[in-house]
Image (cartoon, coloured by chain):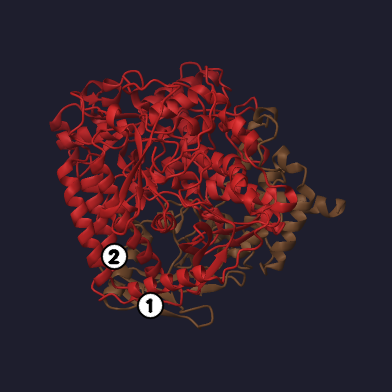
Amino acid sequence: MKLFLKIWRQKSAQDNGSMKDYTLDGVEGDMSFLEMLDVLNEELISKGEEPVEFDHDCREGICGMCSLQINGEPHGPDRLVTTCQLHMRKFNDGDTIVIEPFRAKAFPVIKDLVVDRSAFDRIQQAGGYVSVNTSGNTIDANAIPIEKEKADDAFNAATCIGCGACVAACKNASAMLFTSAKVSQYALLPQGRVEATDRVLNMVKQMDLEGFGNCTNTGACEVECPKGISLENIARLNREYLAASIKG
Amino acid sequence: MGVLDSKVPSGPLAEKWTKHKNEINLVNPANKRLIDIIVVGTGLAGGAAAATLAELGYNVKTFCYQDSPRRAHSIAAQGGINAAKNYQGDGDSPYRLFYDTVKGGDYRSREANVYRLAEESVNIIDQCVAQGVPFAREYGGLLDNRSFGGVLVSRTFYAKGQTGQQLLLGAYSAMNRQINRGKITPYNRHEMMDLVLVDGKARGIIARNLVTGEIERHAAHAVVLATGGYGNVFFLSTNAMGSNVMAAWRAHRKGAFFANPCFTQIHPTCIPVSGDHQSKLTLMSESLRNDGRIWVPKRKEDAEAIRAGKLKPTQLGEEERDYYLERRYPAFGNLVPRDVASRAAKERCDAGYGVNKTGEAVYLDFAAAIQRYGKEKALTSGLKNPDAATITKLGEEVIENKYGNLFQMYEKIVDENPYKTPMMIYPAVHYTMGGLWVDYNLMTTIPGCYSAGEANFSDHGANRLGASALMQGLADGYFVLPYTIGDYLSDDIRTGPISPDTDEFVKAEEEVKARLEKLMSGNGLHSVDHYHKKLGKIMWNKCGMARNEKDLKSAIKEISELRKDFWENVKIPGEINAKNQELEKAGRVADFLELGELFAKDALTRNESCGGHFREEYQTEEGEALRDDKNFTFVSAWEYKGEPKDAVLHKEELKYENIELKTRSYK
């Protein structure tokens, strides 16, 4: 395959970036999208140019480090995959592919396609935990039976990888899907109920402080989420938030 | 004993840990506030240790090269975590877990450490459930278990195929609680470049801010290295792209002994290599061997026809298939330990029975399980006389519920539907049992420098059993290190803050800067990946699943030449004082080029086969590993003396007081 790539290049957070054109030949369908970029970078290095920087680590769709807005979609055209699991067989010879960083005020660009998602960490720090000590002096695990359906729902919410695709997909750059996934995981479990009120208030407050937009129920986040995190979590967050505000 | 003192407490095995905890020195809560600890790496071991240390009252700084602690590669662990809970009532106990682990490790691990691990395993599950980790449950609301390789009980707790993710997010949440309290200061996108010693004690690190390129000095009373394994020395492995040995290797160069570097786990069930562009390999969880059956065609002609695309695996009948693990190991069947399963796959493929284009793949087949589950489900759903299509549909649903994300991952990568046609799998580098030598307290040979999780060597001997890495990471991090480190720090309560401005720190910083400048000043002939791939090929071909004296000797020579070439000719574009991914990679590959040589040297020295270390010269008539207990029941701990070829071997004799050394048999 021969591809025409339009890639966002930006030297640092302070610089203005711009799109640059590249042509890449010899791309195979078995390559992942990031392996395609590896090949491009090897070419750039051999020409003495700076390679394109992008975030990536596990390359098996679980660490949440890879990102990229590909032809306008976070993680590209395939569904339920991260960019590292997107394979070039989804593209055709002669295609033009536009590659940009995730765009959001709360995710400033660091370099090229690398963005700063530390806002997500700070939302978690505001309350994404159960306040138990890690000393091991707790009750036997089976002393807390949990209905299988609820445990499964909590698990499904907990599979969020924190990649930020939901924010990049949203016209408002809202982080509601991300925040609601963590709120839901704990709201569904008895261990999490104890601090439910403070958790939802604090996490939403931090989310707003970080400059994420509001949710207008468009649902683009759910469509683009590589882990299929459900919009139901946002509904649950709204219920939790309302209840907590009244209780306040 | 020499210079190595394992500090294993005296007394009966089952009482050692309790006795030790009762006898070691403690630091009182008010004094803990005066003590700083650096934790490098935020996976299960580092994240858990940081959280617990902060909770105990110490001031903690964490470092990780990723953009968030949540991204550490523990997150990719799929199948599960072992614990001797005996919830299934199948006769499990800490002793049995201990025994299985020592046997699985082919009798090359330290008894007392392994027993402690088995003892603490039960606490991990309680702890994680209390934290809200959503483990899989049965309909009655209690926790579910599955089986893993090398054992005869069901003791593996899991969260679908994302157990590592859920456990890591649990540790990350515990960290977040402490970050919120101001007890942990996280330094993300930072890489440890060197360890700083003051008066022979580890007192800090030099780190590089990966965003700005700035070199920073960080001082503390103790340093914990929980930086994972070094599987990426093979270039292709199931490790994350950034996984590296730099922190451990820098400590090694400063005096920490490196133990058993050649003990590497080649995992039997990974997605086969598809081409030269490949950047990493993807694991298919060992849990799949609960239900999947491994086979190759019985006749070579059939294998050839399959490779040529003229025959489909589903066209071969039962009698035309060779379920070679079930044939060779009837007692454990498809659930033999990883080293055994990997070698058996290699044996069949080398003999010409491989089933993909390159002949380096075997089948992992779920057809039988789909039928079995389908019939069971039809029965429990009250369906009488269900037709074949219904049974298959129901069976596929059960399999999807158990392994859905793994099947999806396979389909995305290989572009084949594993519900309809068997998966193709082949062994790949996965985990390194070797690592920094530590004593019973998890302290390296440098006072004040600790190592936890995969980065140390202690618990898995020459082969790690499935679902034991998560167990060890969390046991070290939550329950062992936070207590044993107090014994050392109790001497430091009056030391006061450690200054990062002493000569030792200044000198270490200068050395780091000089090294980076040297890397940037190469002749610019080849990229970092060019060297990394070359190193990987040498390692895989000569230090991989089967090793021999001739190959190992040539590997040593080739790696040392490659290292010289690298330092002269590596090409790194970009700037030194800015974000520069090529420079990051170069620093890591530079250390792999030293470690690789020591790895080969270690394998050459160990004239026996044990666990994942298979020397072709030492095998039984049936091709099984042949240990030499008389001469090799020891840990090889290497002391740095300049070039890897000059490294000096120290031996820690392993004493088995509670388990009789036997030939491992899974037949």
Left or right of residue B505: residue B171: right
Q: Disc 2: which chain?
A: A
x, y (%) of residue B505? 51, 69
Left or right of residue A206: residue A99: left
Q: Is residue B322 above or below residue B408?
A: above
In which quadrant of the rendered view does residue B186 lie?
bottom right
Q: Disc 1: which chain?
A: B
- The residue located at (52%, 25%) in the rendering is B13
- Secondary structure of the residue carrying numbered label 2: loop
x, y (%) of residue B129? 64, 37
Amino acid marked by disc 2: Asp
Please give the residue where the numbered disc 1 appears in the rendered image. Answer: B574
The answer to whether residue B666 of the structure is visible from this angle is yes
- Secondary structure of the residue carrying numbered label 1: loop
- The residue located at (25%, 54%) in the rendering is B645
The answer to whether residue B82 of the structure is visible from this angle is no
Say which of marks 2 and 1 sits in front. 1
Chain letter for the part of the structure drawn in brown: A
- The residue located at (75%, 52%) in the rendering is B30
Chain B hue? red
Mark 1 Cα-neighbour bin, 10 Å: few <14, some 14–19, many ≥20:
some
Mark 2 Cα-neighbour bin, 10 Å: few <14, some 14–19, many ≥20:
some
Q: In the rendered image, which quarter contains the C terminus of chain A?
A: bottom right
x, y (%) of residue A139? 70, 31
Residue nearer the viewer, B431 or A237: B431
Tags 2 and 1 in contact by the CB under 8 Å rule?
no
Amino acid marked by disc 1: Gly
Q: Is residue A106 above or below residue B419?
A: below
Which residue is farthest right? A247
Please give the residue where the numbered disc 2 appears in the rendered image. Answer: A93
- The residue located at (34%, 38%) in the rendering is B269
